[in-house]
Amino acid sequence: MITIYGMRASGNCYKLQLLLDQLGRDYRWIDVDSAHGATRTPEYLAMNPNGKVPLLELEDGRRLAESDAILCYLAEGTAFWPDDPWLRAQTLQWLFFEQYSHEPCIAVARFIRGWLPAGHARQGELPALLERGKGVLGVMEQHLAGREWFVGGRYGLADIALYAYTHCAGDGGFDLSPYPGILAWLARVRTQPGHTPMQH
Protein backbone atom coordinates (compact mmCIF):
# COMPACT_ATOMS: atom_id res chain seq x y z
CA MET A 1 0.00 0.00 0.00
CA ILE A 2 1.22 3.51 -0.77
CA THR A 3 1.76 6.04 2.00
CA ILE A 4 1.09 9.77 1.80
CA TYR A 5 2.77 12.11 4.28
CA GLY A 6 0.60 15.20 4.30
CA MET A 7 -1.31 17.93 6.07
CA ARG A 8 -5.06 17.56 5.59
CA ALA A 9 -5.78 21.30 5.37
CA SER A 10 -3.14 21.85 2.67
CA GLY A 11 -4.47 22.15 -0.85
CA ASN A 12 -1.31 20.57 -2.23
CA CYS A 13 -1.99 17.51 -0.08
CA TYR A 14 -5.75 17.56 -0.67
CA LYS A 15 -5.14 17.10 -4.41
CA LEU A 16 -3.73 13.66 -3.71
CA GLN A 17 -6.51 12.72 -1.30
CA LEU A 18 -9.11 13.76 -3.87
CA LEU A 19 -7.51 11.81 -6.73
CA LEU A 20 -6.96 8.69 -4.64
CA ASP A 21 -10.52 8.78 -3.28
CA GLN A 22 -11.90 9.22 -6.79
CA LEU A 23 -9.80 6.30 -7.99
CA GLY A 24 -11.09 4.23 -5.07
CA ARG A 25 -7.51 3.35 -4.22
CA ASP A 26 -6.37 2.27 -0.76
CA TYR A 27 -3.65 4.34 0.84
CA ARG A 28 -2.17 5.11 4.23
CA TRP A 29 -2.12 8.75 5.34
CA ILE A 30 0.40 10.00 7.90
CA ASP A 31 -0.44 13.47 9.21
CA VAL A 32 2.50 15.89 9.15
CA ASP A 33 1.81 19.36 10.56
CA SER A 34 3.95 21.38 8.19
CA ALA A 35 2.53 24.66 9.53
CA HIS A 36 4.20 24.02 12.88
CA GLY A 37 7.61 22.69 11.88
CA ALA A 38 6.97 18.96 11.47
CA THR A 39 8.61 18.93 8.03
CA ARG A 40 11.80 20.49 9.41
CA THR A 41 12.74 17.64 11.74
CA PRO A 42 15.88 15.61 10.93
CA GLU A 43 13.67 12.53 10.44
CA TYR A 44 11.43 14.18 7.86
CA LEU A 45 14.28 15.98 6.09
CA ALA A 46 15.97 12.59 5.67
CA MET A 47 12.94 11.56 3.59
CA ASN A 48 12.43 14.87 1.76
CA PRO A 49 15.37 17.29 2.00
CA ASN A 50 13.13 20.08 0.64
CA GLY A 51 11.11 19.87 3.87
CA LYS A 52 7.63 20.03 2.34
CA VAL A 53 4.46 18.00 2.10
CA PRO A 54 3.03 16.04 0.42
CA LEU A 55 5.41 13.12 0.06
CA LEU A 56 4.54 9.78 -1.55
CA GLU A 57 6.22 6.61 -0.34
CA LEU A 58 5.86 3.35 -2.25
CA GLU A 59 5.91 -0.09 -0.65
CA ASP A 60 9.48 -0.63 -1.88
CA GLY A 61 10.65 2.55 -0.11
CA ARG A 62 10.92 4.83 -3.15
CA ARG A 63 9.71 8.36 -2.46
CA LEU A 64 8.36 11.14 -4.66
CA ALA A 65 7.84 14.79 -3.68
CA GLU A 66 6.02 17.71 -5.38
CA SER A 67 2.25 17.42 -5.45
CA ASP A 68 1.72 17.66 -9.19
CA ALA A 69 4.46 15.13 -9.97
CA ILE A 70 2.74 12.75 -7.54
CA LEU A 71 -0.61 13.43 -9.23
CA CYS A 72 0.82 12.47 -12.63
CA TYR A 73 2.37 9.29 -11.24
CA LEU A 74 -0.79 8.18 -9.45
CA ALA A 75 -3.01 8.95 -12.44
CA GLU A 76 -0.90 7.01 -14.95
CA GLY A 77 -3.09 4.58 -16.86
CA THR A 78 -6.34 6.18 -15.68
CA ALA A 79 -8.89 8.45 -17.36
CA PHE A 80 -7.59 11.40 -15.30
CA TRP A 81 -4.30 11.50 -17.24
CA PRO A 82 -4.92 11.44 -21.01
CA ASP A 83 -3.00 9.24 -23.46
CA ASP A 84 -2.88 11.91 -26.17
CA PRO A 85 0.44 13.84 -26.09
CA TRP A 86 -1.22 17.20 -26.83
CA LEU A 87 -3.79 16.76 -24.06
CA ARG A 88 -1.00 15.71 -21.68
CA ALA A 89 0.95 18.85 -22.58
CA GLN A 90 -2.14 21.00 -22.00
CA THR A 91 -2.63 19.30 -18.64
CA LEU A 92 0.98 20.02 -17.71
CA GLN A 93 0.50 23.63 -18.81
CA TRP A 94 -2.26 24.02 -16.20
CA LEU A 95 -0.29 22.13 -13.54
CA PHE A 96 2.63 24.51 -14.04
CA PHE A 97 0.25 27.48 -14.00
CA GLU A 98 -1.23 26.18 -10.75
CA GLN A 99 2.14 25.95 -9.02
CA TYR A 100 3.84 29.02 -10.51
CA SER A 101 0.97 31.55 -10.78
CA HIS A 102 -2.03 30.31 -8.81
CA GLU A 103 -0.62 28.76 -5.63
CA PRO A 104 1.85 31.59 -4.84
CA CYS A 105 -1.01 34.07 -4.36
CA ILE A 106 -4.22 32.09 -3.68
CA ALA A 107 -2.66 29.60 -1.28
CA VAL A 108 -0.24 32.06 0.34
CA ALA A 109 -3.05 34.52 1.13
CA ARG A 110 -4.98 31.65 2.74
CA PHE A 111 -1.93 30.68 4.81
CA ILE A 112 -1.34 34.25 6.02
CA ARG A 113 -4.97 34.73 7.02
CA GLY A 114 -5.48 31.27 8.48
CA TRP A 115 -2.24 30.37 10.18
CA LEU A 116 -0.44 33.60 11.11
CA PRO A 117 -1.45 35.94 13.97
CA ALA A 118 -3.26 39.18 13.15
CA GLY A 119 -0.26 41.40 13.85
CA HIS A 120 2.22 39.32 11.85
CA ALA A 121 4.44 41.27 9.45
CA ARG A 122 3.33 39.12 6.50
CA GLN A 123 -0.21 40.51 6.79
CA GLY A 124 1.15 43.43 4.78
CA GLU A 125 1.54 41.12 1.76
CA LEU A 126 -2.19 40.54 1.46
CA PRO A 127 -3.20 43.50 -0.75
CA ALA A 128 -0.63 42.57 -3.41
CA LEU A 129 -1.54 38.87 -3.19
CA LEU A 130 -5.24 39.65 -3.61
CA GLU A 131 -4.50 41.82 -6.64
CA ARG A 132 -2.34 39.15 -8.27
CA GLY A 133 -4.91 36.51 -7.43
CA LYS A 134 -7.62 38.42 -9.26
CA GLY A 135 -5.51 38.21 -12.40
CA VAL A 136 -5.03 34.47 -11.96
CA LEU A 137 -8.75 33.91 -11.43
CA GLY A 138 -9.41 36.03 -14.50
CA VAL A 139 -7.26 33.70 -16.61
CA MET A 140 -9.22 30.72 -15.34
CA GLU A 141 -12.56 32.45 -15.89
CA GLN A 142 -11.63 33.32 -19.47
CA HIS A 143 -10.52 29.74 -20.20
CA LEU A 144 -13.74 28.29 -18.78
CA ALA A 145 -15.94 30.44 -21.03
CA GLY A 146 -17.80 27.87 -23.11
CA ARG A 147 -15.97 24.96 -21.45
CA GLU A 148 -16.95 22.61 -18.64
CA TRP A 149 -13.42 21.39 -17.89
CA PHE A 150 -9.87 22.66 -18.29
CA VAL A 151 -8.53 20.08 -20.76
CA GLY A 152 -10.06 17.93 -23.46
CA GLY A 153 -13.69 18.35 -22.51
CA ARG A 154 -13.47 16.00 -19.54
CA TYR A 155 -12.64 16.10 -15.84
CA GLY A 156 -8.97 15.41 -15.18
CA LEU A 157 -5.79 16.28 -13.34
CA ALA A 158 -5.86 19.95 -14.32
CA ASP A 159 -9.26 20.30 -12.66
CA ILE A 160 -8.14 18.45 -9.53
CA ALA A 161 -4.98 20.55 -9.18
CA LEU A 162 -6.76 23.87 -9.66
CA TYR A 163 -9.78 22.93 -7.56
CA ALA A 164 -7.67 22.25 -4.47
CA TYR A 165 -6.94 25.88 -3.61
CA THR A 166 -9.62 27.60 -5.71
CA HIS A 167 -12.52 26.05 -3.81
CA CYS A 168 -11.22 27.52 -0.54
CA ALA A 169 -9.97 30.82 -1.99
CA GLY A 170 -12.44 32.64 0.25
CA ASP A 171 -10.25 31.66 3.22
CA GLY A 172 -7.60 33.94 1.74
CA GLY A 173 -10.00 36.83 1.26
CA PHE A 174 -10.90 36.25 -2.39
CA ASP A 175 -14.45 36.96 -3.54
CA LEU A 176 -15.40 34.45 -6.25
CA SER A 177 -18.78 36.03 -7.05
CA PRO A 178 -17.37 37.98 -10.05
CA TYR A 179 -16.34 34.65 -11.63
CA PRO A 180 -19.51 32.74 -12.59
CA GLY A 181 -17.58 30.34 -14.80
CA ILE A 182 -15.34 29.35 -11.91
CA LEU A 183 -18.31 28.97 -9.54
CA ALA A 184 -20.12 26.71 -12.02
CA TRP A 185 -16.93 24.68 -12.54
CA LEU A 186 -16.42 24.27 -8.77
CA ALA A 187 -19.99 22.95 -8.52
CA ARG A 188 -19.32 20.45 -11.32
CA VAL A 189 -16.16 19.20 -9.60
CA ARG A 190 -18.10 18.60 -6.37
CA THR A 191 -20.56 16.34 -8.23
CA GLN A 192 -17.87 14.03 -9.67
CA PRO A 193 -18.01 10.39 -8.54
CA GLY A 194 -15.93 9.72 -5.45
CA HIS A 195 -15.48 13.40 -4.60
CA THR A 196 -14.50 13.92 -0.96
CA PRO A 197 -14.15 17.28 0.80
CA MET A 198 -10.97 18.76 2.20
CA GLN A 199 -10.49 17.85 5.85
CA HIS A 200 -9.44 20.62 8.19
Image: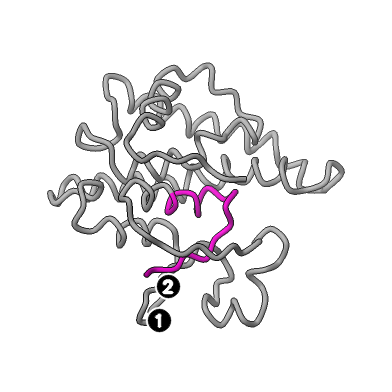
- Quarter of the image where one finds residue 110: top right
**Quarter-wise, where is residue 67 in the image?**
bottom left
- Taking depth in this image into account, of 141 and 27 the one nearest to the observer is 27
* Identity of the residue drawn at 18% across and 48% down: 82
Along the viewing direction, whichever of 99 and 10 lies nearer the viewer: 10
Q: Are marks 1 and 2 in contact (CB under 8 Å)?
A: yes
Residue 114 pos. (x, y %)? 71, 43
Q: Nearer the viewer, residue 64 or 195?
A: 195
Q: Is residue 35 above or below residue 97?
A: below
Q: Quadrant of the N terminus?
A: bottom left
Q: How is the image coloured?
A: one colour
166 versus 48 height, above or below: above
- Residue 122 is covered by the magenta coloring: no
- Residue at image mark 1: 61
The amino acid marked with disc number 1 is: Gly
In the displayed structure image, the side of residue 112 where residue 13 appears, left or right: left
Q: Which residues are magenta?
A: 1-17
Residue occupying image coordinates x 82% and y 48%: 121
Circle 1 residues within 10 Å: few <14, some 14–19, many ≥20: few
Residue beneath the point at 55% across and 77% down: 49
x, y percentage for residue 129? 63, 38
Q: Which residue is mark 2?
A: 57
Q: Where residue 28 appears, x then y in whole percent?
A: 46, 64
